[in-house]
Amino acid sequence: MVEEIILKVTRKGQITIPRQYRDILGIKEGDLVCMQLNDNKVIISKIGIPEPGQPIGEKKFKEIIGQLEEERSRWL
């Protein structure tokens, strides 16, 4: 397990995920991550993109499309 690291929040509310954590999770530029609040703790996990043709179900499909549309709206 990686040791605890203290991060500084920018004035825009941003933090940088340290390289060692990105490496462990396999997070690269452009990847999507999921952030959850659980008992006053923030949990960040990498969202895996399904392979073409992989069955994911209607609920997961709508969730992925919603996340992509939300991200796309930020680009404009």
Image (cartoon, helix red, strand yellow):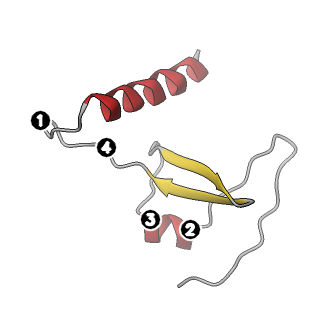
Residue 20 relative to residue 66: left or right: right
Q: CA distance from mark 1 to mark 3?
A: 24 Å
Amino acid type, callout 1:
Gly
State the residue position of label 4.
49
Q: Earlier in the sequence, mark 4 or mark 2?
A: 2
Say which mark, if any, is on residue 25: 3
Q: Name which quarter of the figure residue 42 lies in.
A: bottom right
Q: Earlier in the sequence, mark 3 or mark 4?
A: 3
Real-space CA distance between mark 3 and mark 2, rounded to the nearest whole angstrom: 10 Å
Whether residue 8 sits left or right of residue 27 in the image: it is right
Q: CA distance from mark 2 to mark 1?
A: 32 Å
Percent position (x, y) of residue 59? 33, 31
Give me the residue at 56% from left, 18% from top: 73
The residue nearer to you, when weighing 69 against 17, is: 69
Amino acid tagged 2: Arg
For label 1, the SS is loop
Bin the neighbour count of mark 2 within 10 Å (Cα to Cα): few under 14, some 14-19, many 20 and up: few
Q: Which residue is mark 1?
A: 53
Choose between 31 and 66: the one closer to the eye.
Answer: 66
Q: Quadrant of residue 4?
A: bottom right
Secondary structure beneath dot 3 equals: helix
At label 3, the amino acid type is Leu
Name which of mark 2 and mark 1 comes first in the sequence.
2
For label 2, the residue is: 19
Residue at coordinates 52% horizontally, 47% vertically from top-left? Answer: 34
> Residue 74 location in percent, x, y?
60, 22
As drawn, 19 above or below 42: below
Q: Residue furthest right?
A: 11
N-terminal of the pair, mark 3 or mark 2, is: 2
